Amino acid sequence: MKTFDAPVPVRRRLSSPRHRRAALAAALAAALLGTLGNAPAPRTETVRPAVAACPPNLLGKATCYTGQDANGAYYAMAVPTQWNGSLVVHAHGGPDLGDSSDPSRSTDDLGRWAVMVEEGYAWAGSSYRRGGYGTRMAAADTENVRKLFVSEFGKPKRTYVHGQSWGGDVAAKVAETYGRQPGAYDGALLTSGVLGGGSRGYDYRVDLRVVYQYYCHNHPRPSEPQYPLWQGLRADSTMTSAGLRARLQECTGFASAPAERTALQQRNLDDILAVTRIPERALESHLRFATFTFRDIVSNRLGGRNPFGNRGVWYSGSHDDKALNAGVERFSADPTARRDLSYDSDLTGKVSIPVLTLHAIDDPTAFVEHEAAYRATLQGAGRGGNLVQTFTTETEHSALSDSEYANSIAALDTWVRHGRKPTPRSVAASCADFDEKYGSGCFYDPTFRPAPYASRIRPRPGGLAWPAMTAAQERAWSRIDGVGIAP
């Protein structure tokens, strides 16, 4: 039986005339610059939340707000009509690759996770100040939207950070960086999280990039300018996602029925999937990441330096492993580039708040072995007691059952309020009550435990110990001028 604290009336704080004038001036400046050439307005003050249309699934259930913070990040907020007094701060996945903040991202995510608001929680999410990679930047923008909510509506009874996909890494970084501040965050919910961090979490995409090129020879083609594959794509390339898809189809026939593929296409596809251990249905999306997001990481965030390596990796599962390993492109990471990516996105495991995770066993994008890496990270930091992990038999990455999301936030809330740490079995058992309301199903497997990360992602030399970045290493690196990825 679900219980909430008594509903809390919403008390918006009125701004001063000076603040209102500054906000109006900023809005007018933005409008004027927009008419002069779509250039983004320089932001010096935050524009306060303005009432906005709610997503259709929240009409009549909440009051919704949008705004833009002083760093240029758009955000969305929602306060339910029957607010239980607590707040969920959401960190979105991706990363998106636009140059600036996308106002639709936070409003779209509010619609996707409206279940949190339907359960009585206020919700706040940032679109981040720009697209492209930057975990610490995204964590800072997530923390900023929490502060904006507090300044507008007062301090919630409890605050939970939630992250999905890459947002799981962002939310975990929020928990480590800001969770020690008294009253900032009371717990974290990480769903479908990329929890292996950046320095190891993309190694299987590095492998895909080089293995694909070994078999396909069309990314780049011999007739095109050549570049090292760790770049993902040369900085000045005009290739589109559609163009990449056409090359993948040309080489593997992945979009065709098996009977329509040539013998060579089928063998290429079989070899690529067997060696990389990537599900066929997710092959295109992983290759997009290893192309366009790698380009962003290398060219836009690391000044052209290489954070990736594959020396010492033995590729197996193909029809001719010896030839593959002799012919595949090899490279080593630039130590400073790897350091900066690690500092930006790896996790130390030093969390002082309860953390609950939810992950589909057959997640085709963020393999469930990321959870094994995260458990090893917290255990390596002596914080394993702060973690409960749950798993479902679902086969999706971007969205799991609403019944499970509602159940998860309720289990975390109960843990925080009463100090009773749940178990995978108790979380699974409580889902039925929520499924009566949402009817989206409960698919928990409380006996499942993921295999070690290295069983799925081929480890690099020295890459078996967790955490990938210790708290001591983080402190040491933080003293280096310009370390990490710039906001």
Image (spheres, grey):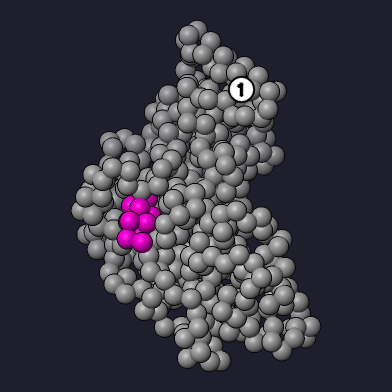
Report the side of 471 relative to 335 (left or right). left
**Could you tell whether 434 is left or right of 146 in the image?**
right
In this rendering, the answer to whether 271 lies above or below 363 is: below
Q: Residue type at mark 1? A: Ala
Judging by the rendered image, the residue that carries numbered circle 1 is 30
- Indicate the quadrant where residue 174 lies: top left
Residue 87 visible in the displayed image: yes
Give the residue furthest to the right. Answer: 260
**Viewport quadrant of the C terminus:** top left
Position above or below: 442 against 329 = above
Q: Nearer the viewer, residue 124 or 325?
A: 325
- Tell me if mark 1 has few (under 14), some (14-19) or many (20+) residues whose alpha carbon lies within 10 angstroms of its own: some
398 in relation to 179, above or below: below
In the image, what residue occupies the spot 25% across and 57% down?
Answer: 470
Q: Residue at x 66, y 38 (%)?
A: 55
Asked whether residue 343 is drawn in magenta, I would say yes
Residues rendered magenta in the picture: 334-344
Task: State the image coordinates of residue 244 (x, y, percent, origin top left).
Answer: 67, 64
Residue 218 falls in image quadrant: bottom right
Q: Position of residue 272 (x, y in %)?
A: 57, 80
Residue 81 picture location, percent across and down: 57, 30
Q: Residue at x 36, y 61 (%)?
A: 334
Q: Is residue 173 left or right of residue 229?
A: left
What is the x, y in percent for residue 152? 47, 23
